[in-house]
Structures are given as C-alpha cells and as structure tokens.
Image: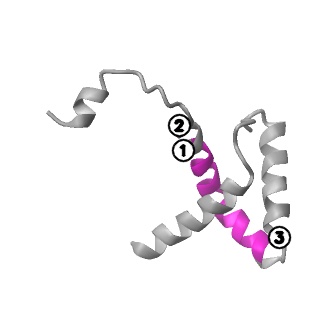
C-alpha cells in the first residue's frame, strides 16, 4: 500500500493546492494569447491585469489568486515544454 492509497480515502484539508492548479490550467489555456501580447510589447502587469479583468467578469477569478502567479505559471509551462 502506498501513501496515496491511504490518503485517497480522506478529504484533503489543504484546498489551496486545488485553487492554484485551477490558475495553472487557466494560464495554460492562455499561453498563445500571452505569447501574442508579449510580442506586441505588453508588460506582465498589463497582461496579468487583463487576465484578472476577464476572469472577474466571467465570475471565475478567485480572490486568493495573485496576478504574479500567472507569470510564474507561464514560465513553468514554457520550461516544461522545453524539457519534453
């Protein structure tokens, strides 16, 4: 029996991991648009503010998300893509 076999029987108490994964998936979906915005010369602050505005209007932005996580996730996604 593994650690995860035991833990899967319980409800996770640290829900922030799930919320951060949701922001990662959001960032992943937006990679092509982020790349285009970067090519057009927009700053990370402008890009992240635009993402927050769009997601807030759609009711998907969580108040515990931080805009700088978008940039971190983007860099992680690009790095993962190069490693494959």
**Percent x, y for residue 18?**
53, 37
- Few, some or many residues within 10 Å of mark 1 (<14, 14–19, 20+): few
Secondary element type, mark 3: loop
Residue 32 versus residue 41 in the image, above or below: above
Magenta range is 22-38
**Percent x, y for residue 81?**
48, 70
Q: Are marks 2 and 1 in contact (CB under 8 Å)?
A: yes
Indicate how the structure is coloured in the image: one colour
Residue 80 versus residue 63 in the image, above or below: below
Magenta residue check for 55: no
The quarter of the picture where residue 1 lies is: top left
Secondary element type, mark 2: helix
Between the C-alphas of marks 2 and 1, the distance is: 5 Å
Does residue 65 appear left or right of residue 21 in this picture? right
- Few, some or many residues within 10 Å of mark 3 (<14, 14–19, 20+): few
Residue that mark 2 sits on:
18
Mark identifier at residue 21: 1
Between the C-alphas of marks 2 and 3, the distance is: 28 Å
Q: How many marks?
A: 3
Residue that mark 3 sits on:
43
Q: Residue at x 39, y 72 (%)?
A: 84
**Percent x, y for residue 47?**
80, 61
């Amino acid at each position: 029996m593994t650690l995860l076999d035991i833990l899967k029987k319980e409800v996770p108490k640290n829900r922030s991991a799930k919320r951060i994964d949701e922001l990662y998936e959001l960032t992943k979906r937006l990679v092509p648009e982020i790349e285009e915005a970067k090519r057009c010369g927009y700053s990370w602050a402008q890009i992240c503010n635009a993402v927050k505005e769009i997601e807030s209007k759609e009711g998907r932005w969580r108040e515990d998300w931080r805009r700088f996580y978008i940039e971190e996730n983007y860099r992680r996604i690009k790095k993962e893509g190069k490693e494959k």
